[in-house]
Image (tube, rainbow, N blue to C red):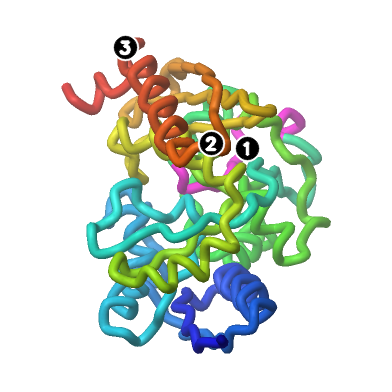
Amino acid sequence: MTSKIIIATRESRLALWQANHVKQLLEAQGHEVSLLGMTTMGDQILDQPLSKVGGKGLFIKELEVALLEGAAHIAVHSLKDVPMDMPEEFDLACILEREDPRDAWVSPHFESLESLPPGAVVGTSSLRRTVLLQALRPDLQIAALRGNLDTRLRKLDEGQYAGIVLATAGLKRLGLHDRIRQSFSLDTMIPAAGQGAIGIEICANRPELAQILSKLNDLSTAVRVYAERGVSRTMGGSCSMPLAAHARLDGNTLSIRAAWGDPQNPKAPLVHAEDQCQIDMHSSHALDQASHLGVLVAHKLIAQGAMKAVQS
C-alpha cells in the first residue's frame, strides 16, 4: 500500500540534495513523496558564529514545527546538525549509510595545509576545526566562515581566504570532487560526531512512519554514529564545544577516538582519548552498547582535564 509522505527540508543546495536522495529511496518503495522547502534561523543568521547565537538546533527548529503541525511527515538533516538531546516529541527514526566522513582541504592555490605560508588565513567557523587546525599549524590565522557550501566557496574564490575546510561528504554529494585538494586523515582531523551521515526525524507518535523508514536504516552507520554522539552528549556537545569524535567498526569490534580543545584557548594542547568494545550487531542492544562506549571515552577526556576551562 502506497502512502503520501511530505519531507521538510532546508533550501540550501546540499539540504535539497539530501532530501531528494531520501525522496528517491522512498519512491522506490512505492510511496508518493514531495518536498516542503523551508528557511531556518541558522540559514538567516550568517554574521555570527553558531556557538554564539543558539547552536546547531537553529538549523532544525522550523522543520520540527512543521512536523508538529502536520505540514510535513519527516525531516531530513545532516546528522551533525542534530542536537544530541532531542525533545521527547521527536525520534531519530533512521540513519542512512554514511558518506566519506573526512574533512576536506579546499584552496585555489595551495595543495595542502602544509604548503601554506606562515600567517595565511584559513576559513572555518567550526570550533572543532579551529582547535584541530591550530594544533597542526599554530602559525596560521583562523577566520570565521559562515554560509551554505556555495557561499563558502564563493568567499574563497573572492580571495578572502588562502584555503577553507569543508566536509568531504557535502562536496562529493554535489559533484564538487574537483574542489577537494586533499581529504585530511581521520587521525589528523578527527571529524565531528555524525559527520557524513543523514538522519531522518519524525514525531515520536508516528510508529507507522518509523516502520517505513526502518528499511532505510544502515545499522553499521547507526552503531558508529551512536558511539560518537554518546561522547558528545556526555560532554554537553554543542557548537560551543571544540569536540571531535569518530568511530570505526571492524567486524564486531567498535573503536572510537575523540579529541577536545579548550574553547577559551584554541592554541592549548588537545586532549585525546580512545577505547573499543565488542558489539553484538544482532542484538537489540547494539545501539545502547555503542552509546555506552561513547560515554566511557567522554569520561576519559574529562579525567584528562577536558571541560575544566568551561566549568571554571
The answer to which quarter of the image holds residue 255 is top right
Q: In terms of secondary structure, where does tag 2 sit?
A: strand
Q: How many discs mark residues in the rendered view?
A: 3
Q: Is residue 118 magenta?
A: yes
**Residue denoted by label 2:** 141
Q: Earlier in the sequence, mark 2 or mark 1?
A: 1
Q: Residues within 10 Å of mark 1 (few under 14, many from 20)?
A: some
Q: In terms of secondary structure, where does tag 3 sit?
A: helix
Q: Is residue 259 magenta?
A: no
At horizontal 50% and vertical 63% (from top left) the residue drawn is 147
Q: In terms of secondary structure, where does tag 1 sit?
A: loop
Seen in the picture, residue 187 relative to 102 is either above or below; the reply is: above
Nearer mark to the viewer, of 2 and 3: 3
Magenta-highlighted residues: 113-126
Expressed as whole percent of the image width and height from the top left, the position of residue 73 reads: 41, 79
Q: Amino acid at mark 1?
A: Ala
**Residue denoted by label 1:** 120
User: Does the residue at mark 1 contact the one at mark 3 (Cβ under 8 Å)?
Assistant: no
Expressed as whole percent of the image width and height from the top left, the position of residue 124 reads: 52, 47
The answer to which quarter of the image holds residue 115 is top right
The residues tagged by marks 2 and 1 sit, at their Cα atoms, a distance apart of 6 Å
Nearer mark to the viewer, of 1 and 3: 3
Q: Amino acid at mark 2?
A: Gln
Seen in the picture, residue 274 relative to 201 is either above or below; the reply is: above
The answer to which quarter of the image holds residue 183 is top right
**Quarter placement of the N terminus:** bottom right
Q: Earlier in the sequence, mark 2 or mark 3?
A: 2
Expressed as whole percent of the image width and height from the top left, the position of residue 37 reads: 47, 83
Tag on residue 303? 3
User: Does the residue at mark 2 contact the one at mark 1 (Cβ under 8 Å)?
Assistant: yes
